[in-house]
Image: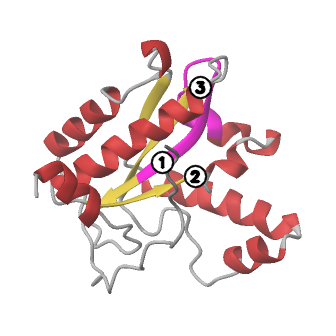
């Protein structure tokens, strides 16, 4: 099996980190892989924000927790009410991927960039978690100061983040893939 296919099949979402911050050269390689993701008409509508400030990540999680609890949605309230709720799952850092709001395919292109980075991180021995839940609170006017701290270019909106670090959890068996998710025509 070639290395790319192995990385795709072996990469797992990690939700428990040992606190070590990934090395700068690994982070730079991961960012480079994100920049080389395909994008519609090669517009590259993304902006990458590297957050190594755990206190900022905690404030984003707290704002999101408040919003989820106030939503009244049963699943959201249950999730946010869990002890130690943290959108970033204790990762020591994250890369937020924001997209140009004027680009119709921006969110899809950003998703591709995050997937490239997740696979690159795995291949470099880093645990990672691809998330979107953190950004729900960032679009609220009451949290404008948190959004401003991300230093995004004008007209960009956060879509996803990739949590990065070193795993402290022992991963169990992988869940089986959903049956009946493919059909052929012709």
Numbered badge on residue 91 = none
Instruction: Look at the image and tell me whether residue 73 can be seen.
Output: yes
Residue in view at x 70 percent, y 66 percent:
65
Residue at the disc numbered 1:
161
Single out the residue that lies furthest toward the front.
186
Residues in magenta, as a range = 147-162
In the image: residue 103, left or right of residue 55: right
Residue in view at x 62 percent, y 32 percent:
148
Numbered badge on residue 132 = 2
- Residue 100, horizontal then vertical, whole percent: 59, 22
Q: Residues within 10 Å of mark 3 (few under 14, many from 20)?
A: some
- Residue 154, horizontal then vertical, whole percent: 62, 17
Q: Residues within 10 Å of mark 1 (few under 14, many from 20)?
A: many
From this view, report whether residue 76 is shown above or below residue 129.
below
From this view, report whether residue 109 is shown above or below residue 161.
above
Front-most of residues 115 and 21:
115
Q: Nearer the viewer, mark 3 or mark 1?
A: 3
Q: CA distance from mark 1 to mark 2?
A: 6 Å
Residue at the disc numbered 3:
105
| Earlier sequence position, callout 2 versus callout 3 | 3
Q: Quadrant of the N terminus?
A: bottom left
Q: Secondary structure at mark 1?
A: strand
């Amino acid at each position: 099996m070639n290395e790319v296919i192995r990385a795709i099949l072996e990469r797992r979402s990690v939700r428990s980190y040992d606190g070590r911050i990934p090395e700068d050269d690994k982070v730079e390689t991961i960012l480079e892989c994100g920049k080389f993701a395909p994008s519609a008409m090669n517009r590259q509508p993304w902006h990458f924000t590297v957050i190594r400030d755990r206190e900022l990540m905690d404030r984003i999680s707290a704002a999101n927790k408040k919003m989820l609890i106030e939503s009244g949605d049963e699943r959201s309230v249950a999730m946010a009410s869990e002890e130690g709720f943290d959108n970033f799952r204790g990762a020591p850092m994250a890369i937020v991927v924001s997209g140009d709001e004027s680009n119709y395919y921006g969110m899809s292109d950003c998703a591709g960039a995050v997937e490239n980075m997740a696979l690159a991180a795995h291949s470099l021995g880093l645990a990672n978690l691809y998330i979107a839940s953190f950004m729900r609170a960032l679009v609220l006017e009451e949290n404008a100061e948190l959004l401003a701290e991300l230093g995004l270019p004008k007209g960009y909106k956060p879509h996803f983040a990739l949590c990065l670090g070193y795993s402290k959890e022992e991963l169990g068996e992988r869940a089986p893939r959903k049956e009946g998710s493919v059909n052929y025509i012709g």
